[in-house]
Amino acid sequence: MAVVFAPLRAADVDDAAEVTSAALPPPVGGTETPEGRLERQRGRFAGALASDPGGLWLAREGDVPVGVALALRSDGLWVLGLLAVAPAAQSGGIGRGLLERALAYGDDCRGALIASSDDPRALRLYATAGFALHPVVAADGPITRAALPAGLDATVAQADAAAVERTVPIDRAIRGGARSAHLATLLTVPDTHLFLAGERGYAVGRQGRLITLAATDELAAQALLWRVLAETPPGVEAVVERIGDGQQWALDVVVRAGLRLRLDGPLFTRGQLGPLRPFLPSGGYL
């Protein structure tokens, strides 16, 4: 049966969330339930429909949803927030069709970012679309609380969502473009918090999971990462992902915190970006 690609609409949100949950493994660590994950995905698609309707595509085979893509753009940068194909429909060109349509949403953007899985098909897809591959590692596990530095609260403060505009000059200097509206959407997820190191940097974390971080210097970046790790609830493993080349400051922190290191899906980049350091990208908002 022929596959039909169409812009994702509000009526498709449940189908898109179901395809995503079936196609992608659950996040490492954390306490999220399957029901909570579905609800988070629904909120994510609903938020993207409000901010970036041109970046959402759904693939159907007959009446069955088989794939979804979500792309975001802000301040001249394009990011692929999500690309998922139902397991039974993989390797049939659906992913490429979705990516081509999502990329068109960023035709006039100067730079692009993708956080890939380690699936060989995804790696080939992004590499053949003109993206450069950057290997990364991740870290997870129970933290060694004795390693937490003293005085973190004097350097890093938790801020409310109203302070998200303070991330704009930091992201422009480090990423090459701001994303405050998308970060504001991210902060609507329960237990997700914004941390600020004055005007030197910021991090977004959720119960010990580092979601994203950007800073103007490595000392501020390390303080922010330690502050997120300090929020890990008892019995929950901390998670820090996408630690790439040039982010030795982050590697130093996670090793001192006692986390396990493992290979992670790579980061792909294209076009004109900032230095991307000190920087840890998010998977969905980069």
Image (cartoon, rainbow, N blue to C red):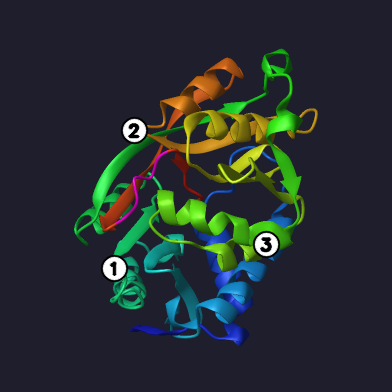
Q: Residue at 34% across / 73% down in the picture?
A: 106
Main secondary structure of the magenta stretch: loop
| Label 1 secondary element | helix
Relative placement, left or right, of 142 versus 81 is right
Please tell me how crowded label 3 is: few (under 14), some (14-19), or many (20+) other residues with Cα within 10 Å.
some
- Segment colored magenta: 273-277
| Label 3 secondary element | helix
Spot occupied by residue 63 in the image (x, y as percentages of width and height): 50, 85
Residue placed under numbered mark 2 in the picture: 245
Quadrant in which the N terminus appears: bottom left
246 within the magenta span? no
Q: Which mark is residue 96?
A: 1
Relative placement, left or right, of 182 versus 235 is left
**Residue type, label 3:** Arg
Spot occupied by residue 149 in the image (x, y as percentages of width and height): 68, 19
Mark 2 or 3, closer to the camera: 2
Up-down relation of residue 22 to residue 132 (above or below): below
**Residue type, label 2:** Asp
Residue placed under numbered mark 3 in the picture: 40
Mark 2 or 1, closer to the camera: 2
